[in-house]
C-alpha cells in the first residue's frame, strides 16, 4: 500500500466532510417557523456525514487497514449501515414531516445493532480463511439489500409526493424536489459501490475514499439550492387543507360537470397564476377529490398537466399573433410563475424552446403566405 497516498486521500475527504458537517449543523437558514422541518432534515444529514467522517478519522489515526484488513472492512460496512438510515430519514423528512417516529428509530437502531453483532461475531469467532471471507461477503450483500430496501421506500414516497403535487397545483412544484430522486439513485449506487470498493486491494484503497467526494459535494450543493425553493414547496404543502370526504357518485358521464369545466376553460380561468385544484373546486362548487378524479379520467392527465397544456396552447397562439411581444411577457400572461418554468414546460411538450418554436412557425407561416400569392 502507498500509505502516503492513502492518508492524503483520507485528509482530502475529511477536510471536505468537516466543512459540510459544520455547514449542515450551523449554516444559517431564514429565521422562520416554516424552515423547522428543513433544519431537522439538514441536521440528520449532518449527523450522517459526521458518522462517515468518524469512520475516516479512525482509518487515518489508527491505520486500522494495515493492522487488520477484515476489521477495517467490517467497520466500514457497519458504519454504512447506520449511515444509510440517517441519509434516508433526512430525505424522507422533507417529503413527509411525520416520517420519523419512535417505531422507525427503534427499528433502525435494533437492525443496526443486530448487524454489528453479526459482523463482530464473524470477525472474532471464525478463523481466517474461506468461512470468514464468505461471512464478510454475506454481510456486504446484506448491507446492499438493506440499502436497496430503504431507497425503494424513499423513491415510492417521492413519487407519491410528486403525484400529489401534480394533482393539486398548476405550477410544476415537483421540479424543486427532483434532486431528491437523483440523490437517492446516486446514494444507492454510491452505497453499493462503497460496499464493493471497501474490498479493493491495498494499493487501490484510496479509490474507495476519493469516490465519495463527488457524492458529498452534490449532496451539499443540493441542500443549499433547495433552501432557495423550500419556502415555495412548504407553503404549497401547508396550503393543502387536507383530503375531502370520499365521493360516492360516478363521474364518468357527468354532463353538468363537463359543461361547468368547459365554461371555465372558455373563460380562460387557467391563466390565473398559482392556480390550485382547491381554487377550481370552489369555483365549480365541487370538492377536490371529485374534481381530481374527473380530470384524471376525462383528460387522462394530472391537474398540472391539464392546466399546463392549456397554458402552452394559449402561449403558442400569443407567440404567433404577437411576434413583437417578449417571451417573458407571454410567459407571465399565460399564467406561468417564471420564464424558466415556462421554457422548461414548453420544451418538454414541444421539443424546443418558445423562441425556436416561434421562429420556426413564423417562417412556415410566411412561406405559406408567399405560396398563396
Image (tube, rainbow, N blue to C red):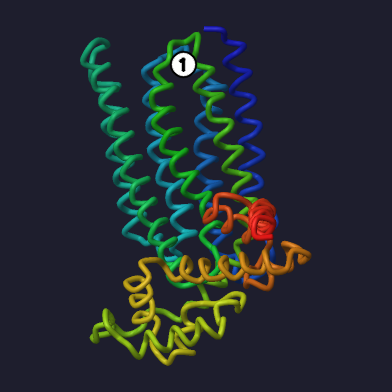
Q: Residue at x 60, y 17 (%)?
A: 7
In the image, 296 versus 108, the foreground residue is 296
User: In which image quadrant can residue 102 be found?
Assistant: bottom left
Give the left or right position of residue 104, taking residue 184 as reference: left
SS for callout 1: helix
Question: Looking at the figure, which quarter contains the C terminus?
Answer: bottom right
Q: How many marks?
A: 1
> Horizontally, is 169 left or right of 31 in the view?
left
Q: Residue furthest right?
A: 324
Residue drawn at point x = 56 percent, y = 24 percent: 210
| Above or below, 109 relative to 176 | above
Q: Residues within 10 Å of mark 1 (few under 14, many from 20)?
A: some
| 226 lies above or below 216 | below
Give residue 150's position: percent from left, percent from top.
Answer: 35, 46
Query: In the image, is residue 309 above or below residue 354?
Result: below
- Whether residue 133 appears in this view of the structure is yes
In which quadrant of the rendered view does residue 134 lie? Answer: top left
Residue 311 horizontal/vertical position (percent): 57, 70
Q: Whole-percent x and y of residue 365?
A: 65, 58
Question: Which residue is most to the left?
Answer: 131
Tell me the residue that label 1 is attached to.
65
Is residue 167 shown above or below 149?
Answer: below
Tell me if I can see residue 228 in this picture.
no
Question: Residue at coordinates 47% horizontally, 10% vertically from top-left?
Answer: 202
Task: Give the residue at x 43% y 15%.
Answer: 200
- Residue 236 spot, x, y in % from top left: 54, 72
Please, which residue is most extreme toward the front here? 373
Res 256 → quadrant: bottom left
Amino acid at each position: 500500500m502507498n500509505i502516503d497516498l492513502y492518508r492524503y486521500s483520507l485528509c482530502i475527504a475529511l477536510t471536505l466532510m468537516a466543512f459540510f458537517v459544520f455547514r449542515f449543523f450551523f449554516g444559517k437558514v431564514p429565521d422562520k417557523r416554516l424552515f423547522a422541518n428543513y433544519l431537522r432534515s439538514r441536521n440528520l444529514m449532518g449527523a450522517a456525514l459526521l458518522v462517515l467522517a468518524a469512520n475516516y478519522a479512525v482509518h487515518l489515526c489508527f491505520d486500522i487497514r494495515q493492522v487488520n484488513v477484515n476489521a477495517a472492512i467490517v467497520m466500514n460496512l457497519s458504519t454504512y449501515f447506520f449511515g444509510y438510515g440517517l441519509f434516508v430519514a433526512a430525505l424522507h423528512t422533507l417529503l413527509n414531516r411525520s416520517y420519523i417516529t419512535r417505531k422507525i428509530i427503534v427499528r433502525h437502531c435494533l437492525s443496526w445493532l443486530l448487524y454489528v453483532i453479526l459482523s463482530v461475531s464473524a470477525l472474532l469467532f471464525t478463523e481466517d480463511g474461506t468461512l470468514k471471507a464468505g461471512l464478510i461477503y454475506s454481510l456486504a450483500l446484506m448491507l446492499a439489500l438493506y440499502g436497496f430496501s430503504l431507497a425503494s421506500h424513499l423513491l415510492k414516497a417521492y413519487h407519491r409526493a410528486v403525484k400529489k403535487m401534480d394533482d393539486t397545483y398548476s405550477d410544476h412544484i415537483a421540479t424543486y424536489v427532483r434532486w431528491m430522486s437523483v440523490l437517492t439513485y446516486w446514494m444507492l449506487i454510491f452505497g453499493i459501490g462503497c460496499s464493493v470498493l471497501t474490498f479493493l486491494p491495498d494499493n487501490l484503497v484510496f479509490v474507495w475514499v476519493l469516490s465519495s467526494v463527488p457524492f458529498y459535494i452534490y449532496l451539499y450543493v443540493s441542500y443549499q439550492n433547495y433552501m432557495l425553493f423550500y419556502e415555495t414547496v412548504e407553503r404549497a404543502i401547508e396550503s393543502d387543507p387536507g383530503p375531502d370526504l370520499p365521493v360516492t357518485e360516478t363521474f364518468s358521464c357527468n354532463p353538468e360537470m363537463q359543461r361547468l369545466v368547459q365554461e371555465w376553460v372558455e373563460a380562460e380561468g387557467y391563466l390565473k397564476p398559482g392556480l390550485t385544484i382547491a381554487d377550481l373546486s370552489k369555483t365549480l362548487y365541487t370538492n377536490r377529490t371529485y374534481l381530481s378524479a374527473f380530470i384524471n379520467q376525462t383528460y387522462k392527465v394530472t391537474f398540472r398537466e391539464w392546466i399546463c397544456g392549456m397554458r402552452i396552447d394559449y402561449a403558442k397562439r400569443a407567440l404567433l399573433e404577437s411576434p413583437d411581444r417578449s417571451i417573458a411577457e407571454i410567459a407571465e400572461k399565460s399564467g406561468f410563475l417564471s420564464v424558466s418554468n415556462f421554457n422548461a414546460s414548453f420544451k418538454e411538450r414541444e421539443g424546443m424552446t418558445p423562441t425556436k418554436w416561434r421562429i420556426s412557425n413564423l417562417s412556415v407561416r410566411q412561406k405559406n403566405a408567399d405560396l398563396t400569392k
